[in-house]
Amino acid sequence: MNEIAVSRDVAAPPDRVWAVATDLDRAAEVVSGIEQIERLGGGGGFGVGTRWRETRTMFGKTATEEMEVTAVDPGHSYTVEADGHGAHYVSQVSVEPHGSGSRLAMTFGAQPQGIVAKVMSATIGRLFMGATRKALRKDLDDIAAAAERA
């Protein structure tokens, strides 16, 4: 699985950063890269089994993926998984105390499924890594800015 890791310091306490990072209902307002969130299933909150459809425009194409929270260490980290466009995606977001604030980090990985996806990943996948890293950093910047304003 190709994996990208990004992190940044946030001038806000970990509990505030965690609250912003896990506020699914406001995610489209906070994270500029998200165009729309649609919760699936009943209830609110954020925990293992929480599912939603997330719409973003990446590489000039609008895509909607169904996401699911598969692990949570409350206040510290969560893992989200999705399948789409011939790959299995895994993202992990973590928040930890750092200095007088927090460190917010994200890893993102994609495992190609099927022969066509594997060939595409091997040939042009690396071209998209820089743009994906930039998008992940922007997501972290947006979360940090919201936590610092709160």
Image: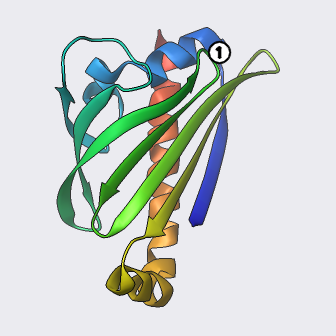
**Side of 96 where 115 appears, left or right:** left
At 65% from the left and 22% from the top, the residue drawn is 76
Could you tell me residue 126's position as x and y percent?
51, 79
Identify the residue at horizontal 29%, vertical 20% (top origin): 26
Task: Using the rendered image of the protein, determine whether residue 148 is visible from the camera's viewpoint.
Answer: no
Q: Is residue 113 above or below residue 149?
A: below
| Residue type beneath disc 1 | Pro
x, y percentage for residue 46?
39, 18
**Image position of 50 with respect to 110: above or below:** above
**Hey, which quadrant is residue 42 in on the image?**
top left
The residue that disc 1 covers is: 14
Residue in the picture at 29% in, 68% down:
59
16 lies above or below 79: above
Of 98 and 95, nearer the camera is: 95
Q: Quadrant of the N terminus?
A: bottom right
Q: Secondary structure at mark 1?
A: helix
Pick the front one: 12 or 104: 104
- Left-right relation of 12 to 82: right
Using the image, determine if residue 57 lies above or below residue 52. below
Taking the spot 45% from the left edge, 39% from the top edge, the residue there is 80
Image side of residue 60 versus residue 6, left or right:
left
The foreground one among 88 and 75 is: 88
Residue 149 visible in the displayed image: yes
Return the x and y of residue 73 as percentages of the image width and height: 62, 21
Q: As rendered, which of 87 and 150 lies closer to the eye?
A: 87
Q: How is the image coloured?
A: rainbow
